[in-house]
Image (tube, helix red, strand yellow):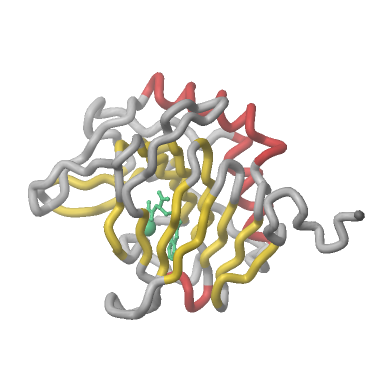
């Protein structure tokens, strides 16, 4: 049987609109997998993963680092973008060319031509790590989309609506999936429930997520 619907591999369409302005591009990062993983190794050698503290004083279960002109940070003083890594006092590593190429190409494919991210947050989930329901509102201009790239162990991603109490949908995100969130979906509440244990052939017991934003 031919792959008539282009979704034979995982039983999922390779392009699916999740909401107005939100598009998932299944497997879009796979051709760049090795370049992305090598680039992440280079970033982490300069700016290691660390578990940051929320303004409320809780250590996050997700470990984070950044690359690009601005990096997302949190501490007792609040959430913000900073040009400097607070652990080293030095600028975040530059955004690798493969990162920029993937983010701009995926945004353009979703209808956001001209998107040029200046910030990439790299999230590392180990089994049990989670990100509670939140909105991304630390960026200056919500007209720019957010591009997210999932690598390693699969996760169930939750997203709701503009109100915290809106019902949430669950979307499985797998190694290589790219999601573009723009338009009305840009400010939707979203989160990642506790990561289930597993063993990914390349990454082991880890899920990585790259989140590309125009912060400044
Ligand atoms: C929906 N990261 O870092 S990426 C975050 O998998 C974050 O690590 C998650 O939420 C992760 O802030 C989810 C997918 C994502 C990113 C931004 C969004 C979904 C979004 C912004 C608006 C709506
Ligand atoms: Fe978020």
Which corner quadrant holds the C terminus? Answer: bottom left
Which corner quadrant holds the N terminus? Answer: bottom right
Place residue 101 in its image quadrant.
Answer: top right
Tell me the residue at 38%/45% (across/down): 70
Q: Where's residue 170, x and y in %?
A: 45, 64
Tell me the residue at 61%/66% (across/down): 23
Q: How many marks?
A: 0
Q: Is residue 187 left or right of residue 131?
A: right
Name the foreground residue: 94 vs 65.
Answer: 65
Farthest residue to the front: give it: 1
Tell me the residue at 48%/73% (across/down): 185
Q: Where's residue 77, x and y in %?
A: 11, 51
Name the quadrant where ligand 1 sits. Answer: bottom left
Name the foreground residue: 56 vs 137.
Answer: 56
Tell me the residue at 68%/51% (across/down): 10
Place residue 37 in its image quadrant.
Answer: top right
Name the foreground residue: 191 vs 85.
Answer: 191
**113 vs 104: above or below:** below
Farthest residue to the top: give it: 45
**178 vs 91: above or below:** below
**110 vs 161: above or below:** above
Q: Is residue 11 left or right of residue 70?
A: right
Q: Where's residue 67, x and y in %?
A: 43, 37
Q: Where's residue 107, x and y in %?
A: 63, 59
């Amino acid at each position: 049987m031919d792959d008539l619907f282009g979704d034979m591999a995982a039983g999922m369409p390779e392009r699916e609109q999740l909401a107005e302005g939100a598009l998932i591009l299944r497997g879009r990062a796979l051709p760049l997998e090795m370049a992305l993983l090598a680039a992440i190794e280079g970033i982490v050698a300069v700016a290691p993963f660390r578990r940051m503290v929320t303004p409320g004083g809780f250590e996050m279960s997700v470990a984070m680092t950044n690359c690009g002109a601005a990096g997302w940070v949190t501490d007792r003083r609040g959430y913000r973008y900073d040009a400097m890594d607070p652990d080293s006092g030095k600028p975040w590593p530059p955004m690798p060319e493969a990162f920029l190429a993937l983010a701009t190409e995926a945004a353009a494919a979703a209808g956001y031509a001209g998107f040029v991210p200046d910030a990439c947050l790299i999230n590392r989930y180990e089994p049990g790590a989670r990100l509670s329901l939140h909105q991304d509102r630390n960026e200056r201009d919500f007209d720019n989309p957010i591009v997210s790239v999932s690598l390693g162990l699969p996760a169930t991603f939750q997203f709701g609506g503009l109100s915290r109490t809106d019902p949430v949908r669950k979307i499985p995100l797998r190694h290589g999936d790219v999601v573009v969130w723009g338009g009305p979906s840009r400010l939707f509440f979203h989160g990642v429930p506790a990561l289930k244990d597993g063993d990914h052939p390349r990454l082991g017991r880890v899920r990585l997520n790259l989140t590309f934003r125009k912060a400044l």
